[in-house]
Image: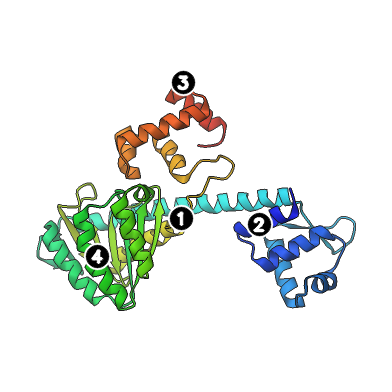
Amino acid sequence: MCLSGAGYVLAVLGLDTTTEAVYSGMLADPEGGVDDLCRRLALPETSVREALDRLADLQLLRASRDVAGALRPVSPALGLELILRRQEEDLRRRQQELALSKAAAALAVSEYAALTPGTTADGAERLLGLDAIQAKLEVLAEEVTRECLSVMPGGAQSQASLDASRALDAGAMARGVDLLTLYQDSVRNDAPTFEYAHWMTETGGEVRTCPTLPPRMLIFDREVAVVPIDPANTRLGALCTREPGIVASLVALFDQTWQTGVPLGADQPQESGSGLTSGEQELLKLLAAGLTDDAAGKRLGVSVRTVRRLMAALMERLDASSRFEAGLKAAQRGWL
């Protein structure tokens, strides 16, 4: 591995330019000290020492066995492996936190699902029908002053939903409100939804995508949340709540999902070591968990036909003649 190639990948994996330069400098001259690095890199001592601390935290520096008190850089190959291992551990932790937040939010919302329409209790209001939901959203969109967080699962959004949202979103962004929206990866293949998401980013909003998402939700100023009464049929109605415990659970769920999202316009990341996209990785997990093609498609926001096409491509890559054999080979390769 050439030094410049290692530096580029390390920068992509989270090393700033100064830290990467210090690491490269130590690889070029392992016996040089802080003064040598400062001189060769034209950096102040404080910057070099901060970079060394960062490298030590990432385990890219080890104690020298030849010189007491000195540090030596690990090889680029080992350094990349260490960083990837740490990122994988962080990803597993975030996934566990996300699962716990989903369960907590679902439990909190279910307590208000039977609320009588048109009444409020503990700051919660039950809205029946699309007209009641739209009327409430129009009021909340006028009241929001700082931020609106949105989760829009299901892949392609209906044209009616996009049309109803455009005026509200445009008005909020014109007032300086930050709009953060999560879509599923599959919207990248739906022209109307993708064009709408692209319009949002050009107008000042932020859009990210994930393979799977929590149920639909809108959160205004992190104080008011609107969620469907039945996530499987959002036309039935919604719950609008200001109850701090519920809103806090939903905000935590959004924030954790947002951290795993890919900004619109960026390439979907490949899973380290496997060459799989995040969508392919998620599909394997869903099918391995026993979900049918139809259920997996709903979770991913794609059609059954797309699920079968993706699975056929994965089976071909694995040289498997059946899904059972594909599951075994995927597990053997560490894809599951």
| Residue 171 placement: quadrant | bottom left
Crowding around mark 3 (Cα neighbors within 10 Å: few <14, some 14 to 19, many 20+) is: few
**Where residue 255 sits: x, y (%)?**
41, 62
Q: Residue furthest right?
A: 66
Whichever of callouts 1 and 2 sits on the residue coming sooner in the sequence is: 2
* Rendered residue at 85%/64% (across/down): 69
Tag nearer the camera, 3 or 2 = 2
Q: Nearer the viewer, residue 302 or 289?
A: 302
Tag nearer the camera, 1 or 4 = 4
> Would you say 332 lies left or right of 159 here?
right
Tag nearer the camera, 1 or 3 = 3
* Rendered residue at 69%/57% (across/down): 7
Whichever of callouts 3 and 4 sits on the residue coming sooner in the sequence is: 4
Q: Which mark is residue 166?
A: 4
**Where residue 232 sits: x, y (%)?**
23, 46
Q: Which mark is residue 8?
A: 2
